Amino acid sequence: MIGTVPLSQEDIVRTLLSARPRLSASIWVMLRDSQSAEDIFQNVSVKALTKGAIFEHEGALLSWAHITARREALDFLRKRRPESLLDHDVLEILDTEWRLEGHLASGGRMEALQDCLEKMPDHARRLLELRYFEGHSCLEVAEKLGLGIDAVYQRLSRLHRALKDCIEQKLNPGGEPPHPSPVS
């Protein structure tokens, strides 16, 4: 754009600090480790200030910060905990959610997801942990839980719907309640 002034260091710091909850939450979802998520957020902030990059607007900075944080989180997992890498499809969903979440203050969608996961029955949470946080295939999950592969697919589908409904209810408490989704 003609006449656009790049963000100053103060603008970069202010923007990153205001996006901190959302960025940290997206890193935490990948790592499940608050301290490592905080370390990565700090690394990204330092890079934004010291690498000589020029950001024309806040959106460019936030997009760069998200991509950089995701890469650092993946590197962390590859080096320290390769068994916990999330499935590529899950990472794509998280990326989409992060981009769509931009209109929600303080990472409301991620906070809602975390609340909804905590309220799920243990057996449902265990299924999700095996599949998405421990990175097992659906066949491996079926074997570990003593279920058929079709049962795992059906339960995951119901859990996805239940999580979606729960998140929507938390983000829109005054709206019409979503149709209940069975969780089993």
Image (spheres, grey):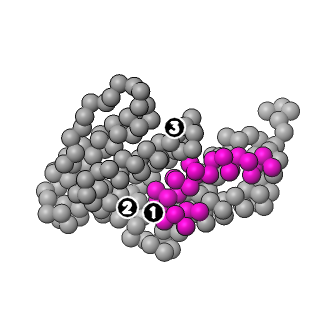
Is residue 108 visible to us here? yes
Which numbered mark, 1 or 2, is in the foreground of this view?
Answer: 1
Q: Which residue is mark 1?
A: 32
Residue appearing at x 23%, y 64% in the figure: 140
Q: On residue 100, which mark appears? A: 3
Disc 3 crowd, CA 10 A, few/some/many (<14, 14-19, 20+)? few
| Name of the residue lying farthest toward the bottom | 80
Question: Residue 173 placed where, x, y %?
Answer: 41, 31
Q: Are marks 1 and 2 in contact (CB under 8 Å)?
A: yes
Say what amino acid the circle numbered 2 marks: Phe
Residue appearing at x 46%, y 59% in the figure: 30
Question: Residue 99 placed where, x, y %?
Answer: 54, 41
Instruction: Tell which circle, 1 or 2, labels the residue nearer the N-terminal end.
Output: 1
Q: On residue 104, which mark appears? A: none
Q: Which residues are magenta?
A: 10-38
Disc 1 crowd, CA 10 A, few/some/many (<14, 14-19, 20+)? some
Main secondary-structure element of the magenta-colored stretch: helix
Residue 90 vs residue 136: left or right? right
Q: On residue 133, which mark appears? A: 2
Is residue 127 visible to us here? no
Residue appearing at x 61%, y 66% in the figure: 39
Say what amino acid the circle numbered 3 marks: Leu
Question: Residue 138 placed where, x, y %?
Answer: 25, 57
Q: Quadrant of residue 168?
A: top left
Q: CA distance from mark 1 to mark 2?
A: 8 Å
